[in-house]
Image (spheres, rainbow, N blue to C red):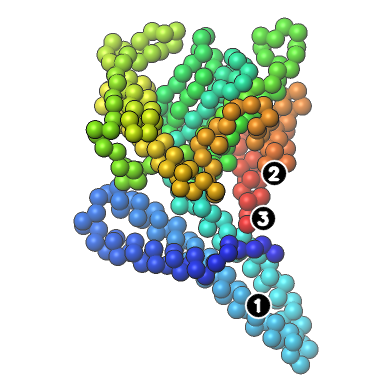
């Protein structure tokens, strides 16, 4: 039997009060900013899902209680029918508890949000940078298959242009954070690099951070707290993408948080993207401080990129990917790196439902 979150009735009551408040605000939609309408509508949809499942669970529990009374009655025929129906009801109750646990996950308010995904090379030199590039390609292909939009923000390539020291992209689409949150952490690869003449297997790492995009009303940033630097955008081999100072680096002076964007030719567009990244990083840091005991912080996601800190291993000689959090493995490693992440993510979602 899956145990639901403690103080379930209290949590449901709190959500009902929040829902009532949202509905009152949406009733005055004429006075709301479009961004606020979007956020309120999204949150209302999430709470509505919780309420629907909670109502189903309450109904199932009532039916179980009624059938247990019938099962204990004197009519043997009715008792047998009640006993048979109880098996189905108990199974329904378990599924509904699992779903309610999932929806009450502390991260659930962010599940429908777009994400900013950051991939960095860890230990292993150029091979780590090549692996980081492989991971970014895997996520962009998976996102494309999901019908999501990929927006490049910034990249830092190694010499030769065949790998990334770090790369940052925004992925827009319904449920992007819900799916990609599983990718946060250190990924390890074991394979023979193309440059390895003796055929020796090398072990390298790359780190992945997945952050729900912060809306402008989520984080208040004062203009006087920002330092904005502009510079030439760099292309392959160090040449400039254009001859104007279009690349933008923004520093939030109170926190020291930095965000850079150089993918657009327009300085204004680069500034908008960099501000979005800055808001997201600041909000992520605030959540880390306020909810440290239950939220994986960006720093925890990235860690020190040591080989011992890993969520998943990509073993090329054995054509096997292993996720160490659920101790499950998959073969056809190249297919997964080509974007077929669905079986892996589905297994992680199923494991979360079972754990409750």
Left or right of 56? Residue 284 is left
Q: Label 1: which residue?
A: 64
How far across and down, in percent of the image, does residue 90 sit?
A: 68, 70
Tag shown at residue 326: 2
How far across and down, in percent of the image, does residue 238 sit?
A: 41, 8
Whichever of labels 3 and 1 marks the residue nearer the N terminus, that label is 1
The residue drawn where x is 27% and y is 64% is: 27
Left or right of 263? Residue 195 is right
Residue 162: image quadrant is top right
Secondary element at image label 3 = helix
Residue 8: image quadrant is bottom right
Out of 97 and 218, give the one closest to the viewer: 218
- Above or below: residue 212 compared with residue 201: below
Whichever of labels 3 and 2 marks the residue nearer the N terminus, that label is 2
* Crowdedness near tag 3: few (<14), some (14–19) or many (≥20) residues, C-alpha within 10 Å: some
Q: Mark 1–mark 2 contact, CB under 8 Å?
A: no
The residue drawn where x is 31% and y is 16% is: 231
Nearer mark to the viewer, of 3 and 1: 3
Whichever of labels 1 and 2 marks the residue nearer the N terminus, that label is 1
User: How many marks overall?
Assistant: 3
- Above or below: residue 99 compared with residue 174: below
How far across and down, in percent of the image, does residue 248 sit?
A: 32, 22
* Crowdedness near tag 1: few (<14), some (14–19) or many (≥20) residues, C-alpha within 10 Å: many
């Amino acid at each position: 039997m899956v145990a639901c979150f403690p103080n379930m009735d209290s949590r449901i009551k709190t959500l009902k009060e929040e829902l009532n408040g949202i509905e009152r605000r949406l009733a005055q939609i004429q006075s709301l900013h479009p961004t606020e309408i979007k956020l309120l509508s999204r949150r209302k949809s999430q709470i509505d899902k919780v309420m629907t499942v909670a109502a189903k669970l309450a109904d199932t529990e009532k039916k179980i209680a009624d059938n247990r009374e019938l099962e204990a009655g004197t009519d043997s025929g009715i008792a047998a029918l009640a006993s048979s129906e109880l098996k189905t009801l108990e199974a329904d109750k378990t599924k509904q508890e699992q779903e309610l646990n999932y929806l009450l996950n502390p991260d659930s308010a962010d599940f429908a949000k777009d994400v900013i995904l950051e991939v960095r090379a860890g230990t292993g030199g150029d091979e780590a940078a090549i692996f980081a590039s492989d991971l970014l390609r895997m996520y962009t292909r998976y996102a494309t298959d999901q019908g999501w939009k990929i927006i490049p923000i910034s990249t830092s390539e190694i010499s030769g242009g065949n790998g990334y020291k770090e790369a940052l992209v925004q992925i827009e689409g319904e449920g992007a954070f819900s799916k990609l949150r599983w990718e946060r952490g250190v990924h390890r690869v074991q394979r023979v690099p193309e440059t390895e003449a003796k055929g020796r297997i090398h072990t390298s790492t790359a780190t992945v951070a997945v952050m729900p995009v912060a809306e402008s009303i989520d984080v208040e940033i004062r203009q006087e707290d920002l330092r904005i630097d502009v510079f030439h955008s760099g292309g392959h081999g160090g040449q400039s993408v254009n001859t104007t100072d279009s690349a933008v680096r923004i520093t939030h002076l109170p926190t020291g948080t930095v965000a850079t964007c150089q993918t657009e030719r327009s300085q204004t567009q680069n500034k908008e993207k960099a501000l979005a990244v800055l808001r997201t990083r600041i909000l992520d840091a605030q959540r880390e401080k306020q909810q440290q005991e239950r939220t994986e912080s960006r720093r925890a996601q990235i860690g020190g990129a040591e080989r011992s800190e890993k969520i998943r291993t990509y073993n090329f000689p054995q054509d096997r990917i292993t996720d160490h959090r659920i101790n499950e493995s998959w073969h056809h490693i190249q297919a997964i790196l080509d974007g077929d992440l669905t079986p892996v993510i589905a297994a992680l979602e199923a494991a979360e439902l079972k754990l409750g």
